[in-house]
Image (spheres, rainbow, N blue to C red):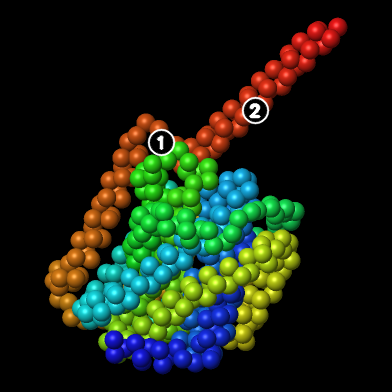
Amino acid sequence: MDMLPAALEVLWRWDVALALLAGSIGGVAIGAIPGVGPAVAIAILLPATFAMDPIVGLTLLLGIYGSSMYGGAIPAILINTPGTAVNALTTYDGYPMTQRGEARRALSLAYSASFVGGMFSVICLIFLSPVLAKIAPMFGSREIFLAALLGMILVVVAHRGQMLIAAALSGFGIFLSTVGLEPAAYTRRYTFEQSWLAGGVDLIVVVLGLFALSQAFLLLTMDDEKIRLPRSRGSLLQGFRELARHPRVAAVSSGFGVLMGMIPGVGEFTAQFMSYTSARKLSKTPQSFGNGSAEGLIASESANNAVPAAAMIPLLALGIPGEALTAMMLSVFYVHNVVPGPGLFQNDMPFVVALYIALLILNLLVLVFLLISTGWLVHLTRIPNRFLGMCVLLLSFVGVFSIRNSAVDCLIAGAFGLLGFVLKRLNLPIVPIILGMVLGGIMEVKLRTSLARIREPLDFIDRPIAFILFCVILIILGSTLWQVWRDWRKPDRRTPQKKAVKHFNTRIAGRTARHFENRIKQQRRRRFYDHLGS
């Protein structure tokens, strides 16, 4: 309790309040625009946060990160188009409600479930902070190296069906982290006698290229669609009363979000699917899922909004980002010489508690803002794609140039933008590149430090936490290889993509057959009536 006044003192500033307000409102607006997402917005704003105090920059980025999922539910429910990728499951039950004229009920359920999930995760983190403060000092160089290696493996394993390409892209990210001066002897690596490569490949330039510029290229190549917003009835407050009738679904789904958020490389998608599947199995009406089920909507929204706060655990406690957005936030720490990890919980616990309180305030601000302004926010879904793409393109290049006033950085960002565009068109992951760059640098430094005290290979795992992490790595690798071998031994070796195509073709063929059957029946009926008339 002694840390609470110190944490409030950190937050009691006008610039922090302004950052919270701008982040919460801006994140909701960005989430409500299909095709943008928090990664693009954070990538664009990242250079500007370097000039701010750490607490101001982080609250701004956390505001966008946490509130964008609230806004992403709006187009998912109204026009069957998720505002952010993690709102995809919201369309399963949100849009059928809209088709029944219950759009306000669906929006209210999404807001209330998101609020419960967000608040639940932050409260869990507040109670977990003392535990983290005791565990974090036990992590030395070899433990952090193994934790970073575990995070890298989890990122690869999380991309089922694309593990080889995810591993290759992670390796490419690690390679990018080695370009420039190496940290021990300061010799040049992979610079090819080019002076502009001596400083290495800047993480922010790569982030802006892979996320912002690639999305701008995608938007510029997409056709503009005319969107008609449906009429709805009901109150935006009724969702809280309905949520109270499903407390188990909200609690279990929020728990999945917290648990999955703490594991590097897992994130919102796994949390959503696990919570949605469990809610469907435990429901008394599982047949309603996918057809406008309130339980399905609560499960998906409470799970994905519980992840952002939980994703800060590996970042703050170990200095290891679990995904691309927390990797971007890690750069804000480094710019201001605030090193996340065991020392942060020992030396600057008020700063950590201030971040948690900021997340609590953020959820309250977002909820109030949504209840007031939903009628205006729905019109953001009508912004033309190409106009939006030009805005993102312009802001991205301005952000890249402002980092070091370098035209070379703009060219590098453009090259990575084209790479990201190709990867997105091929439906290949981008996140492993960013995590490879961040975790690769951490792994290299920690491995060099730990090798100075090791004489035999087994000395690397002679401490309890290191041994546990090593065993977890072996278990994950063994179980993954076993699953791959079992899938290979099955008679049906088609890839998930081919199975999905076959399923889609079967559905289309069935619909086509039913269409022709109905036409034949109509023709026969018409002939019968013509015969009676004659």
Work out which quarter of the rendered image holds the C terminus and state it.
Answer: top right
Is residue 27 left or right of 325 when viewed as pictured? right
Is residue 169 left or right of 514 when viewed as pictured? left
Is residue 20 left or right of 378 when viewed as pictured? left
Which residue lies under the disc numbered 1? 493
Above or below residue 365? Residue 305 is above
* Image position, residue 65 (x, y; %): 50, 71
Dot in front, 1 or 2: 2
Which residue lies under the disc numbered 2? 512
Report the amino acid beneath label 1.
Arg
* Image position, residue 338 (x, y; %): 39, 87
**Front in this rendered view, residue 239 or 506:** 239
* Image position, residue 495 (x, y; %): 45, 41
Above or below residue 17? Residue 376 is above
**Front in this rendered view, residue 231 or 459:** 231
**What residue is at 40 percent from the left and 89 percent from the top?**
8
* Image position, residue 215 (x, y; %): 62, 64
**What residue is at 63 percent from the left and 24 percent from the top?**
513
**What residue is at 61 percent from the left and 70 percent from the top?**
372
Is residue 445 left or right of 41 when viewed as pictured? left
**Front in this rendered view, residue 446 or 224:** 224
**Front in this rendered view, residue 97 or 434:** 97
- Helix, strand or loop at disc 2? helix
- How many neighbours does mark 1 have within 10 angstroms: few (below 14), some (14-19), or many (20 or more)? few
Above or below residue 362? Residue 159 is above
* Spatial CA span between label 1 and label 2: 28 Å
Rendered image quadrant of residue 489 = top left
- Helix, strand or loop at disc 1? loop
Q: Residue 512, can we see it? A: yes
Above or below residue 231? Residue 258 is below
- How many neighbours does mark 2 have within 10 angstroms: few (below 14), some (14-19), or many (20 or more)? few
